[in-house]
Image (cartoon, coloured by chain):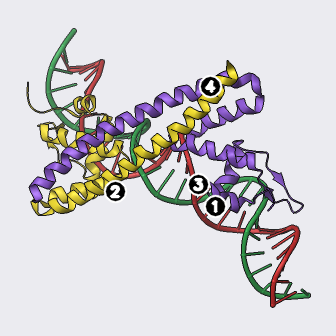
Chain colours: A purple, B yellow, C green, D red
Amino acid sequence: MGAFLSVSEVAGQVDLSAHTLRWYERLGLVGPIGRDSAGRRRYAEQDVERLRFLCKLRDTGMPVRDMIRYVELINVGDTTNHERLEILVSHRARVVAQIDALQKDLKVIDWKIDFYTEATS
Amino acid sequence: MGAFLSVSEVAGQVDLSAHTLRWYERLGLVGPIGRDSAGRRRYAEQDVERLRFLCKLRDTGMPVRDMIRYVELINVGDTTNHERLEILVSHRARVVAQIDALQKDLKVIDWKIDFYTEATS
DNA sequence: CTTCCCCTTCGAGCGCACTCTAAGTCAAGC
DNA sequence: GCTTGACTTAGAGTGCGCTCGAAGGGGAAG
């Protein structure tokens, strides 16, 4: 029950392929990830937690370049907390706008569904 | 005050560029659009209405190939109302799931914002 | 010792949805 | 009549986020 996971084990836990996990590391989104004696990646729990949060940013539509910026700030250290907060707050606003737009669009789709339901019945 | 609009006038009314409007026509998503004596597109109000609804489908994440399928059914005629309804109902479910996922992700982002707000204060 | 499988790097390739280019047409304004 | 500018076409190009391929390494099971 080691605390370290291989790339495919991490892929099984977060919604990313092993290929994508390696690519994220190349981009600097995570890591540098520790290696075992054979050079294989050994993800620590904090790496997996980072990835889980990055997935939330990705799933809510944050571009990869903005995720990179966010992680760069983490790597600089605690002095960047304020800028990280700003990034998240402005991203939050975009997510709220996105939800709002989807709810409006859903109303139009529902209206169309009603139309076809009546036409079909 | 003609009822017909040029490609750039339509681009001003729906959220699509003139280039994209011509591309949508090539894909069969709209049209065939009428032409004036010089061969320029003249969009009728029903064309614009079709485009507005297609934008709702696109904005809610429907792939272009599915929009093409939907429009093909419209072109076949009234006998396809049931299948069109099915497409919209299953798409509706995807949109609801999408909103739900965004709301869950938003909670995590809010939690992180709270963390940074406390760390920064 | 051989087989098998997962791992490594790094660059190329892909699918999507546009987005733009080139070469040419047409009508209106000066 | 010439210029300007919006339009036409078909096809090539772009940006994003992966996704895959090739070539090779290492270790554990039989």
Q: CA distance from mark 1 to mark 2?
A: 30 Å
Looking at the rendered structure, whether the residues under marks 3 and 1 are on a common chain is answered as yes
Mark 3 — on which chain does it sit? A
Of marks 4 and 3, which one's residue comes earlier in the chain? 3
Mark 1 — on which chain does it sit? A
Residue B30 at what x, y percent from top left?
21, 47
Three-letter amino acid code of the residue under disc 4: Leu
Question: Which circle marks residue A12 in the picture?
Answer: 1
Mark 4 — on which chain does it sit? A
Mark 2 — on which chain does it sit? B
Question: Which circle marks residue A15 in the picture?
Answer: 3
Q: From the viewer's perspective, is the residue at label 4 or at label 2 nearer?
A: 4
Three-letter amino acid code of the residue under disc 1: Gly
Looking at the rendered structure, whether the residues under marks 1 and 2 are on a common chain is answered as no
Q: CA distance from mark 4 to mark 2?
A: 39 Å
Tell me which corner region of the image, top left, top right, bottom left or bottom right, holds residue B44. top left
Q: CA distance from mark 3 to mark 2?
A: 25 Å
Q: Secondary structure at mark 3?
A: loop
Residue A51 at what x, y percent from top left?
66, 46
Q: Is residue C22 left or right of residue C13?
A: left
Question: Which circle marks residue A85 in the picture?
Answer: 4
Tell me which corner region of the image, top left, top right, bottom left or bottom right, holds residue B72. bottom left
| Cβ atoms under marks 4 and 1 closer than 8 Å | no
Image point (9%, 59%), residue name: A121
**Residue that mark 2 sits on:** B65
Q: Secondary structure at mark 4?
A: helix
Residue A94 at what x, y percent from top left?
47, 31
Q: Residues within 10 Å of mark 1 (few under 14, many from 20)?
A: few
Q: Is residue A46 above or below residue A68?
A: below
Q: Quadrant of the N terminus of chain B?
A: top left
Q: Residues within 10 Å of mark 2 (few under 14, many from 20)?
A: few
